[in-house]
């Protein structure tokens, strides 16, 4: 016998991953240069040169245990202190090393936080459009996953509808800004109003409602800055990954930050650590902890992403495509001509243009494209986009 829930998750793969695999198969037939693959958010800019140099320096240590040995379960103290120093230099946030738990990337960090908050009857809200994996992450803890409808066309937060969905069982609201898939950055005004709603309802219900801030794209902004949410709403738990900021998606390294100002901060931190322990995600890779300790201050060079963003946004809107202006991350979330994103994406697929329908993001009628691709591919694909919209 097997667990049916686990079987369903394994047997029904992510449509994003399936589309990526299809693109690889087509590339073997027609050539990689003839497949316009916008499916997967795999960073295309190289890591800062200092990262590779730091790896070499760390590996030059002849003491194997110093490089490859276990660290503390919650993370190496020097690494946590380096991260705290960087956050304080940027945000004056009062972060302590003891507020940080080093995680094996954002996904297990989110799972640990959701498990920590999954009291009996717990509900956790996501704001559409949302990263599709939030649903299995939440439901795998036994909590109920609920979706706040999208605030179209700007993709900020529909605060009235969100407030109407809050109940005494609401434990947390997931906030992903810059957002995957829309590329929208929630404004400080939006986040202040959200914090006010959660404060008021938390007082009414007699318990805190946390924001779980999923922030792998925090540094990927264009002409604006993503607000640091704990400075706006203290009951915020941050899950961060260096996958995008340092182009290290395969290394699975990041952190959870539980601010000391958060309600029941000590208990929440212990519950996160305990949940990570139960999942086997403690003592994150020691090599990468040591690298991050020396590189946490580095920032990505966004010039190529910004060029891609402008080329697509300006080119597609000129053709008549509709979308919110993407000020962050490396995604565009576009209204499908004709209203059926699945049908439109299938038509595009026939022309080897790979687009992800928005249904899995909680927003049917839109499709996502990832512009962490080559500029040449964008230029070659634009005529296909125009052919599709002209019908």
Image (cartoon, rainbow, N blue to C red):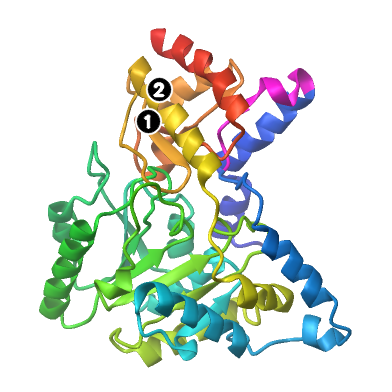
Q: What stretch is highlighted in magenta?
A: 29-40
Q: What crowding class fits label 2: few (fewer than 14 Cα within 10 Å), some (14-19), or many (20 or more)?
A: some
With 153 as the anchor, is 339 left or right in this view? Answer: right
Q: Residue 104, percent across and down?
A: 61, 71
Quadrant in the picture for residue 252: bottom right
Q: Looking at the image, can residue 369 be seen?
A: no
Q: Looking at the image, can residue 355 be seen?
A: yes
* Marking on residue 317: none
The residue drawn where x is 24% and y is 36% is 153
Quadrant in the picture for residue 215: bottom left
Quadrant that contains the N terminus:
bottom right
Quadrant in the picture for residue 3: bottom right
Mark positioned earlier in the residue sequence (2 or 1): 2
| Contact, mark 2 vs mark 1 (Cβ under 8 Å) | yes
Magenta segment includes 37: yes
Q: What crowding class fits label 1: few (fewer than 14 Cα within 10 Å), some (14-19), or many (20 or more)?
A: many
């Amino acid at each position: 016998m097997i667990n049916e829930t686990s079987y369903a998750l394994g047997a029904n793969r992510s449509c994003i991953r399936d589309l990526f695999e299809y693109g690889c198969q087509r590339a073997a037939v027609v050539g990689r240069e003839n497949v316009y693959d916008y499916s997967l958010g795999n960073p295309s800019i190289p890591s800062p040169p200092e990262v590779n140099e730091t790896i070499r320096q760390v590996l030059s240590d002849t003491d194997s245990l110093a490089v490859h040995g276990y660290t503390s379960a919650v993370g190496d103290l020097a690494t946590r202190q380096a991260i705290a120093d960087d956050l304080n230099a940027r945000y004056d946030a009062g972060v302590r090393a003891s507020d940080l738990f080093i995680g094996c990337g954002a996904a297990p960090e989110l799972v640990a936080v959701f498990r920590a908050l999954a009291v009996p009857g717990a509900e956790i809200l996501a704001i559409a459009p949302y990263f599709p994996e939030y649903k299995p992450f939440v439901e795998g803890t036994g909590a109920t996953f609920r979706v706040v409808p999208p605030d179209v066309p700007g993709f900020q937060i529909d605060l009235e509808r969100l407030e109407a969905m809050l109940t005494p069982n609401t434990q947390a609201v997931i906030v992903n800004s810059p957002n995957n898939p829309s590329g929208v950055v929630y404004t400080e005004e939006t986040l202040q109003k959200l914090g006010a709603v959660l404060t008021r309802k938390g007082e009414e219900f007699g318990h805190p409602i946390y924001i779980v801030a999923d922030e792998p794209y925090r540094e990927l902004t264009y002409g604006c800055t993503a607000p640091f949410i704990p400075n706006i709403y203290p009951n915020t738990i941050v899950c961060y990954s260096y996958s995008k900021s340092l182009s290290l998606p395969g290394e699975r390294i990041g952190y959870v930050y539980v601010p000391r100002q958060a309600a029941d901060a000590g208990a929440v931190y212990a519950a996160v650590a305990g949940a990570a322990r139960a999942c086997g995600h403690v003592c994150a890779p020691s090599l990468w902890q040591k690298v991050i300790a020396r590189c946490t201050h580095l920032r990505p060079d966004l010039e190529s992403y910004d060029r891609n963003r402008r080329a697509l946004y300006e080119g597609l809107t000129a053709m008549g495509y509709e979308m919110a202006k993407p000020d962050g991350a490396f995604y565009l979330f576009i209204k499908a001509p004709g209203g059926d994103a699945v049908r439109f994406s299938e038509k595009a697929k026939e022309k080897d243009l790979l687009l992800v329908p928005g249904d899995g993001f909680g927003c049917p009628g839109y499709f996502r494209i990832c512009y962490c691709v080559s500029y040449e591919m964008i230029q070659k694909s634009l005529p296909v986009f125009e052919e599709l919209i002209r019908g």
